[in-house]
């Protein structure tokens, strides 16, 4: 059952992520990416990471991709025009590089992962447990956790500064 | 129990798709989406290993990656919108001057 | 066959499917009569009688409406993006139905489809997916009004989602779990509020209140905020800017007709039911009520499990009535008022509330 679900989600993930980079219409690309994120959330659930699965949908599908769609609609982008020698050349190079990367990955995986056997489940750390993640975040990872809040604050300020455009300098006011 | 090899292979495939997307496309928004794909492929690997090792550390790392990705998208999209206002294009090969 | 049935996994799956079927049918029926109720209540608020021609008291009106919608001509704009145009109405309904899988409608295991440890997060995730229906519907129609409605909707729903998510945090702090069944179970029984200086007949001098969320002082403001954001998330008046008929000619569903339009309508009412169910679950003690709740304090004794379903439905009905009442009494907000209210009032208020609830619960001691 788990394996069948995994194969289904994995196939969906690969197909949708291919469509993201193949489709000419940015809105369709974005929608396929939403589907890819949702199938990834499904895989997280299968891996006993329920919290992450839900956060994946809330953050990626619910916030980030809506932002993407919003920007695409705001800029009123239509189908991408992609033609010409330069673009064909770049496309060829890109796919070749991808094939090379995949080949390298396959070779490494073929050698086997030096990981040892799977660990036993420790009772207090049954993974995917929201309470366990919360405890870890607020004890062992407290400092990085607080740092991310600073990061988000900086991002927020940065976005507002960029989006408002060049601030009017006193010289222009005069 | 899903074999670890399958998960890592899936993660590698999705990462490669992301890389190809960055190299092949010229629309800055699609390139950005491909970067998100790569980040998610890395996340998948983290969760897979966390599940294998029965430790929460990998999942917490994914949580941080998601936070950073959210911040990054907000900033990146703001930059793209700003670029579009200046140049009327989102194609990266038409944006080749440093001074606007 | 018999040995297949003895497999517990098969059994639970079958029961879940049966429950899903029942809930789906009940939801569809509930939505059609909710629309009838809305028209009736609206009529009486405006000193009319509402629908009264089809059947006694107009009770067959929903069926007549359904038949009319089914046979209406379907119109698709020539320049519309066909696939997304067809996809959007489906997206309007699907998340609402999915959320219903985790809502406890009565004591488990009978009246709960599934109890997962991230139930509340599932609700938030699904409500965040609700944005897509309206945004995409508006965009794919290739119509200025529809696009404006869609853009308004996405901005509004993202803004109010934050306040909604934060307003549930005090409840999570109180209950100590994200499982909706766990949250309801935490609200069972009574808690001692104060000892009165005089004695009430039959009750004594001790004042006890049900353990529902709403009866805890630090959960009152979160409830009010949750309710306000619920109006915004379901695009109901006074926050129905995405479909403001006066300025946007029905906004995102201007170009929709026939059953596709009906699906949007269905989605709106299903979202109302879902969000009211969550409010009942978080703040009104879910299935707890006289006859079944409260333990054995005072004159209330535990009753049969189906009483839980009855209480859930009574509370749900009261909230739905409130939704309709508000829609026909309040004027629509202006767009800048809406955004200002969401970001400058609701969001800071929820954050302060989280702090207050956390400090109070910490001061009373963990697990208190």
Image: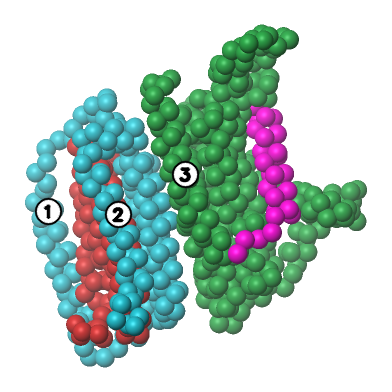
The picture quadrant where one finds residue B100 is bottom left
| Residue in view at x 15 percent, y 72 percent | A97
Quarter the C terminus of chain C occupies: top left
Is B29 inside the magenta-drawn segment?
no
The secondary structure that most of the magenta stretch takes on is helix
Instruction: State the scheme by which the image is colored.
Output: by chain
Query: Do dots 1 and 3 share one subunit?
Result: no
Q: Colour of chain B?
A: red
Q: Is A113 rendered above or below residue B53?
A: below
Q: List x then y, in percent, for residue B6.
A: 23, 50
| Residue in view at x 14 percent, y 58 percent | A106
Q: Is A8 rendered above or below residue C87?
A: above
Q: List x then y, in percent, for residue C28.
A: 68, 49
Residue picked out by circle 1 = A110
C147 relative position to C352: left or right: right
In front of the other: A133 or A32: A133
Residue picked out by circle 2 = A152
Label 2 vs label 3, nearer the camera: 3
- Separation of disc 2 and disc 3 at Cα? 19 Å
- Separation of disc 1 and disc 2 at Cα? 40 Å
Label 3: few (<14), some (14–19) or many (≥20) C-alpha neighbours in 10 Å: many
Mark 2 chain: A
Mark 3 chain: C
Label 1 vs label 3, nearer the camera: 3
Identify the secondary structure beneath mark 3. helix
Q: Magenta stretch?
A: C308-334
| Residue in view at x 67 percent, y 10 percent | C198
């Amino acid at each position: 059952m788990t394996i069948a679900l995994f194969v289904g989600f994995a196939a969906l993930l690969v197909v949708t992520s291919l469509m993201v980079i193949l489709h000419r219409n940015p809105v369709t690309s974005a929608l396929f990416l939403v589907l890819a994120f949702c199938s990834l959330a499904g895989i997280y659930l299968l891996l006993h990471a329920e919290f992450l699965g839900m956060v994946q949908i809330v953050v990626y599908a619910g916030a980030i991709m809506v932002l993407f769609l919003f920007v695409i609609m705001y800029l009123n982008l239509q189908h991408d025009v992609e033609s010409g020698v330069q673009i064909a050349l770049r496309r060829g190079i890109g796919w070749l590089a991808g094939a090379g990367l995949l080949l390298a990955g396959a070779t490494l995986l073929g050698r086997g992962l030096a990981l040892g056997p799977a660990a036993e489940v420790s009772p207090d750390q049954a993974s995917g447990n929201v309470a366990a993640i919360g405890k870890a975040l607020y004890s062992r990872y407290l400092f990085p956790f607080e740092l991310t809040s600073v990061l988000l604050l900086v991002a927020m300020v940065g976005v507002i500064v960029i989006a408002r455009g060049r601030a009017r300098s006193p010289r222009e006011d005069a | 129990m899903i074999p670890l090899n399958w998960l890592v292979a899936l993660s590698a495939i999705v990462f490669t798709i992301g890389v190809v997307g960055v190299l092949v496309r010229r629309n800055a928004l699609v390139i950005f989406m491909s970067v998100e794909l790569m980040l998610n492929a890395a996340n998948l690997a983290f969760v897979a290993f966390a599940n294998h090792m029965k430790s929460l550390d990998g999942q917490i790392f994914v949580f941080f990656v998601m936070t950073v990705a959210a911040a990054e998208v907000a900033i990146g999209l703001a930059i793209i919108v700003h670029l579009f206002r200046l140049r009327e294009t989102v194609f990266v090969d038409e944006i080749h001057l440093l001074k606007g | 066959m018999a040995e297949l049935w003895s497999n517990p996994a098969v059994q639970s799956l079958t029961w879940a499917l049966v429950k899903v079927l029942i809930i789906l049918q009940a939801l569809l029926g509930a939505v059609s009569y909710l629309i009838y109720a809305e028209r009736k209540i609206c009529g009486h608020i405006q000193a009319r009688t509402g629908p009264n021609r089809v059947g006694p008291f107009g009770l067959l009106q929903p069926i007549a409406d359904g038949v009319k919608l089914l046979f209406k001509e379907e119109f698709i704009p020539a320049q519309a993006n066909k696939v997304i145009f067809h996809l959007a109405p489906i997206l309007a309904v699907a998340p609402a139905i999915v959320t219903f899988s985790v809502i406890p409608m009565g004591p488990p295991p009978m009246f709960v489809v599934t109890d997962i440890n991230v139930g509340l997060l599932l609700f938030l995730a699904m409500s965040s997916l609700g944005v897509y229906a309206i945004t995409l519907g508006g965009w794919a129609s290739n119509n200025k009004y529809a696009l404006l409605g869609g853009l308004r909707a996405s901005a509004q729903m993202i803004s109010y989602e934050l306040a909604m998510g934060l307003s549930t945090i005090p409840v999570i702090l109180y209950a100590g779990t994200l499982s909706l069944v766990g949250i309801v179970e935490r609200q069972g029984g009574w808690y001692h509020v104060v000892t009165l200086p005089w004695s009430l007949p039959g009750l004594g001098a001790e004042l006890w209140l049900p353990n529902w969320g709403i009866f805890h002082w630090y959960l009152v403001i979160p409830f009010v905020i949750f309710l306000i954001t619920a109006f915004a998330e379901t695009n109901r008046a006074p926050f129905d800017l995405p479909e403001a008929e006066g300025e946007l000619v029905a906004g995102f569903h201007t170009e929709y007709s026939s059953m596709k339009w009906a699906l949007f309508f269905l989605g709106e009412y299903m979202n109302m039911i879902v969000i009211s169910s969550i409010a009942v679950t978080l703040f009104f003690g879910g299935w707890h009520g006289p006859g079944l709740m409260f333990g054995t304090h005072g004159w209330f004794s535990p009753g049969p499990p189906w009483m839980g379903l009855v209480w859930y439905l009574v509370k749900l009905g009261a909230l739905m009535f409130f939704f309709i009442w508000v829609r026909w009494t309040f004027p629509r907000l202006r767009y800048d008022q809406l955004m200002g209210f969401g970001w400058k009032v609701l969001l800071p208020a929820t954050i302060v509330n989280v702090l207050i609830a956390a400090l109070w619960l910490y001061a009373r001691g963990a697990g208190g």
